[in-house]
């Protein structure tokens, strides 16, 4: 029963998409995509120049701050954040590969 409902939702999605294309909504969708990509670009720019980095470098050099547990915890957090940045880069590369193929 749930599977049948899923198919109905999927069919409705495709009908809606087809109707939208026939009505000329493509320009609106492209504008929305461009807006989303510009927001992503702005977020990445802000992250790269954020003051958190400078503040972090000052904090970790304070006397007594870095115990073994601090180093393990913060090191794991940094490694996880680095992984996320690398994954975001890979996603962007895949997005661009796909985008370049459209309309050829």
Image: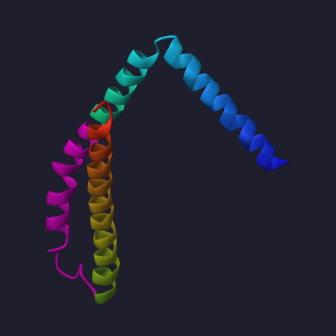
Q: Is 102 colored magenta in this rendering?
A: no
Residue 69: x %, y % from top left: 34, 85
Query: Residue lying farthest bottom?
Result: 68
Query: Residue lying farthest top?
Result: 23
Q: Would you place residue 103 above or below residue 7 in this image? A: above
The C terminus - image quarter: top left
- Which residue is nearer to you in this view: 63 or 36? 36
User: Magenta residues: mostly which secondary structure?
Assistant: helix
The image's colour scheme reads rainbow
Residue 85: x %, y % from top left: 28, 59
Please indicate whether residue 46 sits to the left or right of residue 29 in the image. Answer: left
Q: Would you place residue 58 above or below residue 16 in this image? A: below
Q: Would you place residue 52 above or below residue 32 in this image? A: below
Q: Is 66 colored magenta in this rendering?
A: yes
Please indicate whether residue 63 sits to the left or right of residue 5 in the image. Answer: left
Please tell me which residue is depicted at 24% across the width and 45% down the height of the picture.
Answer: 44
For residue 83, which quarter of the picture?
bottom left
Please tell me which residue is depicted at 33% across the width and 76% down the height of the picture.
Answer: 76
Q: Which residues are magenta?
A: 40-67
Q: How many marks?
A: 0
Please indicate whether residue 28 sits to the left or right of residue 63 in the image. Answer: right
- Which residue is nearer to you in this view: 34 or 80? 34
For residue 90, which quarter of the picture?
bottom left
Residue 71: x %, y % from top left: 27, 82
- Which residue is nearer to you in this view: 44 or 96? 96
Please tell me which residue is depicted at 52% across the width and 13% down the height of the picture.
Answer: 22
Residue 40: x %, y % from top left: 30, 39
Query: Residue lying farthest right?
Result: 1
Please tell me which residue is depicted at 37% across the width and 23% down the height of the picture.
Answer: 30
- Which residue is nearer to you in this view: 102 or 43? 102
């Amino acid at each position: 029963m749930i599977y049948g409902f899923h198919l109905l939702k999927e069919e409705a999605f495709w009908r809606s998409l087809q109707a939208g294309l026939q009505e000329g909504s493509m320009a609106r969708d492209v504008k929305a995509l461009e807006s989303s990509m510009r927001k992503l670009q702005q977020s990445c720019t802000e992250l790269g120049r954020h003051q958190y980095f400078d503040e972090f470098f000052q904090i970790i050099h304070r006397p007594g701050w870095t115990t073994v547990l601090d180093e393990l915890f913060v090191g794991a957090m940094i490694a996880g954040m680095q992984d996320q940045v690398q994954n975001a880069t890979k996603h962007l590369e895949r997005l661009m590969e796909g985008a370049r193929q459209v309309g050829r």
